[in-house]
Amino acid sequence: MNDQATTPRAFLHIGLPKTGTTYLQSILWGHPEELRDQGLLLPGNHRRHLLASLDVREVAGLSLRPGNTEHPWQDLLDEASAWPGDFLVTHEFFASASPAQVRRMVDDLAAYDVHVVITARSVANLFPSRWQEWVKNGGRKSIDDYPPRDEYRPQDNWGWGSFDLADVLTRWSQVIDPSRIHVIAVDRTDEPGLLWERFASVVGVDTSAIDHIDESVNTTLGVVEVELLRRINRHLSEFRSPGDRGHWIRRELAEGGWMPRRRAPIRVGPAKRADLLARSERALELLSDGGYDVVGSLHAFRPRDDSSRRHPDDVTSEEMLGSATRLVAEMLSEIRRLARENEKLRNPR
């Protein structure tokens, strides 16, 4: 716990996506009172942090989002200013902020000792999961054509700037001293709960008072199912808003229990692999020599062998047909259940 007689700390947990952020946020949002008891404020709510990340990065269309979208970043600051201790903001969409946007955040936090927390792993290991998440949110391009654009835009939630560790470190360290950028290694072979313990050690929380949860928070599709979903997305032209795509395509279709669950891992093509290896090497160089606070082993940032994995282009029509027929059967069963439920409500007798 931070000594409250000293300058309070502002922790900005900025991702990266697909590095246990949902797992960590589930613990944090499940125990806000316990965190307050330990001197750490989690202002607002989960959605407010999402909106604040869009606000800071000047994302167009913020006002069209559901709920109160007026100055969400300032709302978090106002709540924190009435709190005497440390506070934490957490959302992976902050990662793609530009140096100028980071500077504005730091200026807004002039009364605090600002620390950045990045949960991270090799971009080569992360990339297939990031592509899958994009497909689950309506993406239509193949894995070797992702991200949808190469150029950096701070408003882009899905571009390189949101998950290429070297790029993120380079931008944020232009404003914040590397010694105050804490990079937590995420390794799928780690013991359960180790990520939470590492995160808690950085933000000054005693884990004995807060139970960690099962780390399997996100739903993962196999190579056949994600390729099937990508092709389905081509026909979902009416699902345009982020809310529509997030609710209906990701939560209902991809994660609603209808898709078959075969966790066959995914690889990229040779050209994309070479690019990812170069990006991973650049991140390793920065972490080794850049003065960043690395929590855990650098091994987590080394690309693993993906030769045993399958490329989505290798998925056969027969495999997709098998998954599609099971999907239709599951959806029809659910439609029947809902129809019967509706009939009972209309005719209770």
Image (spheres, grey):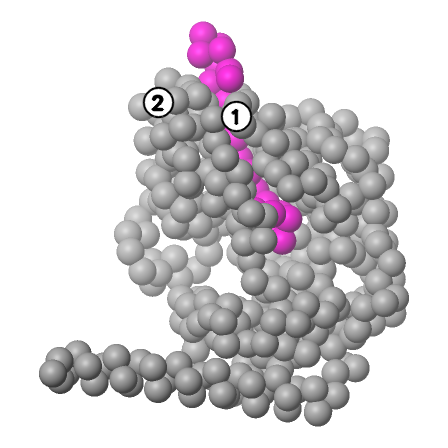
Residue 334: image location, x then y, percent: 39, 81
Q: Is residue 105 above or below residue 153?
A: above
| Label whose residue precedes the other's in the sequence (1 or 2) | 2
The residue shown at (43%, 28%) is: 35
Q: Nearer the viewer, mark 1 or mark 2?
A: 1
Residue found at x 34% / y 82%: 337
Q: What's the amino acid at mark 2? A: Trp
- The dot on residue 138 is none
Q: Depth check: 326 or 265 in front? A: 326
Q: Give the residue pinned by disc 2.
A: 83
Quadrant hosting residue 218: bottom right
Query: Could you say where residue 103 lies in the image, as x and y percent from the top left?
Result: 54, 35
Give the distance between the C-alpha atoms of the residues marked 1 and 2, in whole angstroms. Answer: 24 Å
Q: Residue 250 at what x, y percent from top left?
A: 49, 69
Q: Is residue 148 left or right of residue 81?
A: right
Indicate the amino acid at tag 1: Ser
The range drawn in magenta is 1-21
Q: Which residue is mark 1?
A: 208
